[in-house]
Image (tube, helix red, strand yellow):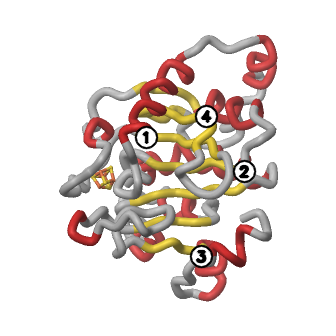
Amino acid sequence: MPSTGCRLSQKRFELSETAVGTVAEPLGEAQEEAQAEPLNASQTEPSVVTLYGTADDSIVDGPGIRFAVFTQGCKHDCLGCHNPKAQPFEGGIPTTTDVLWQKVEANPLLAGITLTGGEPFEQAAALVELARRTREKGLTVWAYSGYRFENLLGGTPNEAAPRLLEQVDVLVDGLFVERLKSLELTWCGSSNQRLIDVPASLAAGRVVEWQQEKNIGQGR
Ligand code: SF4
């Protein structure tokens, strides 16, 4: 699920499509150097992720300036999905997590990354290391999913989903429900969706809602 279900506007379509070209751009010298140490060199995780696109400096996918990764493919088929082109599992742009990481490293203004789509947890294994590196750098990871927190934790839609969840700071979960849509909501599109403080939830063993006032002050 994407920020889409949550708040994906026409403007964001344009952002994604522009970013498609960005992701496909050849790497510069500095990037080649960074590439010498692939993210997944010592891992068994796949490093290829299929994208709908990216937005280099999104301000609508969580607090601050964020590098938004729109994955290709989503099974949820929400009525009113604002990003239907990201639903098919066919197509999309294969890229590597190394290329995405270089984008993160190249922008000193980023507050973090946002994994959205499409359904990012369908490609959880390929995103784990990107998320881990992002947090290691002191940035935050937001993720949007049509799956509920409890389901992701239980291994839906795949065994890598809980591993990716562990690397997420804030999860916006749940399907986009058009009749519950509200423009008054911040960071999500329909009132059934939850903004979840993932580390606090994992520690407490129950869902803890993310509190904007408290966390923005702490840079989260
Ligand atoms: S979760 Fe729903 S709103 Fe989000 S991309 Fe999938 S179908 Fe669209």
Q: Residue at x 38, y 63 (%)?
A: 183
Q: Residue at x 62, y 11 (%)?
A: 26
- Label 2 or label 1, whichever comes before in sequence order: 1
Instruction: Please state which of the two labelled residues, at mark 3 or mark 1, is closer to the viewer.
Output: 3
Figure disc tally: 4
Instruction: Please state which of the two labelled residues, at mark 1 or mark 4, is closer to the viewer.
Output: 4
- Label 4 or label 3, whichever comes before in sequence order: 4
- Label 4 or label 2, whichever comes before in sequence order: 4
Q: In this view of the protein, can residue 104 be seen by the observer?
A: yes
215 to 59, vertically: above or below: below
Q: SS of the residue at dot 1?
A: strand
- Label 3 or label 1, whichever comes before in sequence order: 1
Residue marked by disc 3 = 210
Q: CA distance from mark 2 to mark 1?
A: 20 Å
Kind of residue at badge 4: Asp
Instruction: Please state which of the two labelled residues, at mark 2 or mark 1, is closer to the viewer.
Output: 2
> Along the line of sight, which residue is nearer the eye, 144 or 185?
185
Q: CA distance from mark 4 to mark 3?
A: 24 Å
Disc 4 residue crowd, few under 14, some 14–19, many 20+, Cα 10 Å: many
Kind of residue at badge 2: Ala
Q: In this view of the protein, can residue 129 be seen by the observer?
A: no
136 to 208, vertically: above or below: above
Q: Quadrant of the N terminus?
A: bottom left
**Quarter location, residue 216:** bottom right
Q: Position of residue 167 (x, y in %)?
A: 63, 60
Q: SS of the residue at dot 2?
A: loop
Residue marked by disc 2 = 111
Kind of residue at badge 3: Trp
Point out which mark residue 179 bears.
none
Residue marked by disc 4 = 56
Residue marked by disc 1 = 71
